[in-house]
Every structure is written in C-alpha cells, then in structure tokens.
Amino acid sequence: MPDLASRVAAVFAPDGPLAAADGAFCPRPGQVQMALAVAQTLREGGALVAEAATGVGKTFAYLAPVLLGGERALLSTATKTLQDQLYGRDLPRLIGALGLPVRTALLKGRSSYLCLYRLELARHEAPASATAARELARIERWAQATATGDLAELPELDERSPVIPLVTSTRDNCLGSECPRFRDCHVARARREALAADVVVINHHLFFADLAIRESGMAELLPAARAVVFDEAHQLNETGIQFLGRQLGHRQLQDFARDLLAAGLQHARGLQDWSALAGGLENALRDLRLAAGNPPSSPPGGNTRLRWNALAPEGVPEAGWLAALARLQAALESIAAACEAVQDAAADFPRLLARAQRLARLAAHFAQPATADAARWLEVGLYTLQLTESPLDIAQTVRERLLGIAPPDSSDSSDSPAPPEGLPPFAAVGEEDPFAPSAAPAAPRAWVFVSATLGDDAQLTWFTRPCGLEGAARILRVGSPFDYARQSVLYIPAPAAFPRPADAAHPAAVARLAGDAALRLGGRTLVLTTTLRALRGISQALAERFRGEGAPITVLAQGEYPKRVLMERFRAAGQSKAQGCVLVASASFWEGVDIPGRALQCVVIDKLPFPPPGDPLIEARCRRIEAAGGSAFAAISLPEAAVALKQGAGRLIRCETDTGALAICDTRLISMGYGKRLLAALPPMRRLADEAQLMQALDVLAVSEA
C-alpha cells in the first residue's frame, strides 16, 4: 500500500480525485508542498507552523493528509463562522471526492446552543422590549423543529441580541445531569456525537476554555486525538490569553444576581431573603462602578481602559476602590452562606454556591497587586465595568501543556505563578491531566498551526515566540500562486500630495479618494479603517457626498447592521449594475472577509495598523521587551502592523481571475525608514506613481467589467 505522502500527492494530481470532482480544479505546487509537510508531521509527530498565502488552498492541504491518515483529529478554527464553513462545506466536499467513510462532528461552546431549561425560565420573565419578545417567540417556534439546537440555524437572530444569554447556558448556571431537560440537552448531544466521530471541528475559544477549566467535553476528546490542526492560527495567542486570565465584570455579577433571585423565589421562597441578597450584590456592584469615577477621556457611549499597575487603577482613589471591592466580596460571601444553607432544596443551589465562592475569590484577588508576568486593567463604561488580568502570552502554557516541554527551572517551582483564581492548578506531567503528554497516544501527537499571515520574517517569530513554538516547531512558508503584478496595482500617496496620518484633514482626504474610486467602479469599494473615529468620519463624509451628488452609490458602515447582513448587501450591490456600494469598516473586517469576483475591486486602507497606543496588554509586553534590552517597536509594533497590513491587503485578490487596486493612504510607508519592511510584507503588486495613474487603472477595471 502506498505511504501517506504518496497518497496525499495523488489527491492533488491533474488526474486525481479532486480534479475528477471539480472541473475548475488546477494543481498548485504550493498546496502539494504544504500537504506533504502536514503528512510528514502526522507521521513523525511534533509541531508544524505553516504560513500559506492567499490562493494556496490551505484548507484542503491540511484536510487531505488528516483524512487519509485515518486517525482521529481535531480541527480548530478562529470563529464560529469559519467553523460552520469547514464542517458544512469543505469537509463534505473533500470526503465525497475521496470516497472515505469518515464520521465528522461539529462541537461549539455552550453559548452556541439553545438550553431548553433556560428557555422555559425565560418564558416566565417579562421581555425587556417588544423586539426581545418577538425574538423569544421566534426562538420558541424554532425550538420545536431543530435537531441540533445550534443558534447558527437562525441567521436572522443578531449575534448581539440580549435574548441569547437568556436561552443559553454557561458553565456557571448549567445544572448538568441534574437538569430536568438533560435527556434532550443539545450540548450533551453534540458532545456525544463528537466523542463518536473521527474528525471533530471545534474553535479556538472552545479549545482554550477547556484547557483552562476542563469541563466542556474537550478534555475527553483530546487524549484520543492523534492530530490537532489550528486554522487561522494567527489569532491563537489573543484567544488563548482570554481564557488563561481572570475577569470580573458587571455582566457576570448581574447575571448571577438574576439567577440567584430566580432560583431562590422558585425553589426556596421564604427560606432566605433572596431579594435583599440580590439587591445587596447589585448595590455593591454599583458602588464599585462609582468608585471607578468617570474618566475624562471616556468616549461618548464607549468604554475607557485604565492602566492598573498598583492596588487601584490609574486615576482611581485607592481607599475608595479597595473599600468597594471589600463590600463586593462581603456581599458574595453572604450569598454563599445563604446558598449553602439551602443547597439541598434544588440542584440550582450547589451551582450558585460555587459561583458565589469563585466570584468572591476573584474580588479578593483583584484587591491584591498584580504579578510582574501579567497585565491588569479596568475597562469603564457609563454604567459598566470589567476587571481583567491577563498573561502576556500563551508560550508557557503551550510548551508545558501541549508540547510537553518542561520549563528550564522546573526542578524549583517556588517561584511558579499560582493558577488563576477559580481554576484548577495545572497537573504535572504524568498526573491525571488529559492534556499532559502522558495521556497522549503511544505515537507522538501532531500539532499543525496554519494561517495566511504569521509574521514578516523567515522564522515567523511574531507568531512562534508568544505561542511557545520558537525553536520547537518546523517552519514552512508557501507563497501565493496569484500573479499580483498582473492582477493588481498598489497606490501609496507621496508625502507632498496627501495629508499626514495625524492631520485633521486626513479622514476627509481618504473619503475623497475612496469616493472617486467608487464613482469610477460603480461602488465595489471597501474602506478599512484603524479606528472607530475614522470609520465614523469617513463614512459620514462619503454619505454626504453621494447624497448631494445623487449618485447611485450606497454607503454602508460597520455597526449599522450585523456583519453578515453588511456582507450580503455589499456582495449583492457588487453584482448589480444599477446600484453600487461602498463599505466602510474596521476591526474584524480586516480579515475573514472573502468577496471574490467583481463585487470588490478596490480596497482603501486609511492608516498603517499599528497597535493602539495606551493598550495595557501591549504596554506590558513592550516593557518586558525593553527590560530585556530589546526594541519594543521592532519586536512588537512593526510585526503587528505588518501582519495586520497583510490581512487587510488580502481582502482584494481572492482567486486567479480577480483584479483590483489597493490604496494605502499613509505617507509613512514612503517617508519613514520602517516603511520598507512593511512594504516587503505586502504582495508584489505593481506600484503606481500618483493618483492619476490610480484613477486610470480604475477606469480600465470598470471597462473590463462592463
């Protein structure tokens, strides 16, 4: 029988199964190169870090060897949307082409599934608004027919809907096997299907949530998995630190107060003064918010992050802050005592007791100074606050928990940091830890980390260093098969021809350039901004211009509708000759946006995407680099900007037939010495000398698509 490498190579051959199943398939050397590297990693074990540029076909490049290898595998994606795409489209397509009897399963976190018990409780609560009442009624009708309980089956349900927390469970409020609806539980059914599957599709959030608390069911899956693939791995570090840190905020505490009151009145009315206990917690939370004050820099309707390097956040009076934390801890301890006294009354109370104790420990922890290897900050809104402490990266966790590499000073653990409050300590190698190397199969486990953007140097240190993979993984970089010099052009304005990024006139200049491009193309223009302020300014300027000119151009802005709706409207307008569209967006639209064909032919980036100034986590990382004698700008700021710039530029050319123009409206790419490093990170597009050449190129694009 041919070895795995030979069978993998045959999949991508001109006369192979992919070519037979898809008449549009064309062999790509880079795809084969990556697939063979994954096959080698599956055979030998260890870690592979693969940067596969847009167009390589990285999904099939790792799926083919995983499926042909015939061993159990976990596939993790960055978002639930990509998870659904992988499970619902890519996996079935390749399994069908290969004719393999493979069992697959989709597993998400609790918040993705309808909780039937919570839905029953929500029926007895007065909806917060008429909109909430309509959404709840829609969910109730759907609940009668769904087989999976996956809320993704309701595309009209806004992912930001306040109804979702009312009809989904959390680790805190789930009753587990004691739930009266456990027999029909959608989460339990999804876990059972995952345990019986050969290939399970998960997401990074679920993986790290389980790594931190070992309760979501993944702890049972990983020991039996021979291979773990992280797609869109560039998000791994930022996702991981969310779950390896500590958070205490108004949402947690308000939800707890609501659950406490509901359970108390339903199961133990008269045994405790539940209204007073819940009210005392809400009053303590309000006092803590008042102790934080109103930062003068807080944007209208937005949140402000405050540095927190001492006992109290920056600018917050220490005595009042610590007193408010003590009152919060006392309120939680009173609730814990009340729940302990009635814990035999219903299954809810042992859970509520554990939640109260954990929240009380968190309040006590945040009254103590932060450690040097963590960043701590306070996020304050008009009525809200969130206390956060985060590790600076996931390097130690990955090396010890996943790769089984002991720290150099493992013989002396006296200086080892304590585990986060409320989480079990990590077991030592060889103990009862399902993530420890001793629990792995006899053959070494294979770890594959894949993305289109993982750094701007040969060793991909932007990714490997914070993820603990530097010197511990094989590195592969595969270039794009696209002919960027033929398919695309790049325009960067000269310093004398365009306002500097810090100038007040810069947003208006970006809006003018994007508007001129949209007029020539009949829309089909995406504007990516680095700040929400720029997003608002540019979108307003464009809306006023096209409203005044009466041009058939619609301006869409992030925040007006859910991301899914914005993308659907933008794609539809791109296929219409009667109505064009400009989309102005920030944040998540820099990546994960796939609009091939004529719907998108111009991408305008307002500024270089350097990390935001004042971010406590970035500042803490910079301090660590500088304390070691390094340059924080060279080690953090430049690589961050290079990766984000590659992601933004990658929205333009999505297939071999795409054509388009990229405009980066930041003159620092030309005027500053570091501009060369950032330019080197971009695809090799044909450079234009001035704006006139850009407009000529857009005219050519418009004619070719007419």
Image (spheres, rainbow, N blue to C red):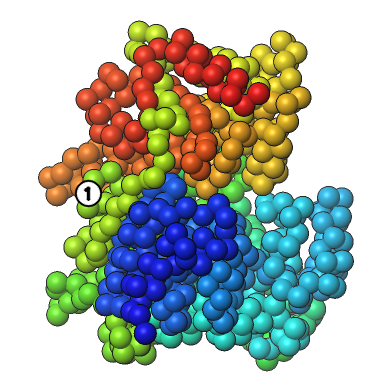
Q: Is residue 672 above or below residue 434?
A: above
**Res. 450 in view:** yes
Q: What amino acid type should be assigned to the residue bearing mark 1? A: Ala
Q: Nearer the viewer, residue 274 or 38?
A: 38
For the C terminus, give its image quadrant.
Answer: top right
Q: Nearer the viewer, residue 657 or 558?
A: 657
**Res. 351 in view:** no
What residue is rendered at 14% in x and 73% in y? 409
Left of 485 or right of it: where is 145?
right
For the N terminus, give its image quadrant.
Answer: bottom left
Q: Nearer the viewer, residue 265 or 630?
A: 630
What residue is rendered at 24% in x and 37% in y? 633
- Give the image quarter of residue 261: bottom right
- Give the image quarter of residue 650: top left
Q: Position of residue 102 (x, y in %)?
A: 55, 80
Q: Is residue 457 above or below residue 706?
A: below
Q: Position of residue 258 (x, y in %)?
A: 71, 66
Q: Which residue is mark 1?
A: 458
What residue is rendered at 69% in x and 61% in y? 152
What residue is rendered at 27% in x and 77% in y? 44
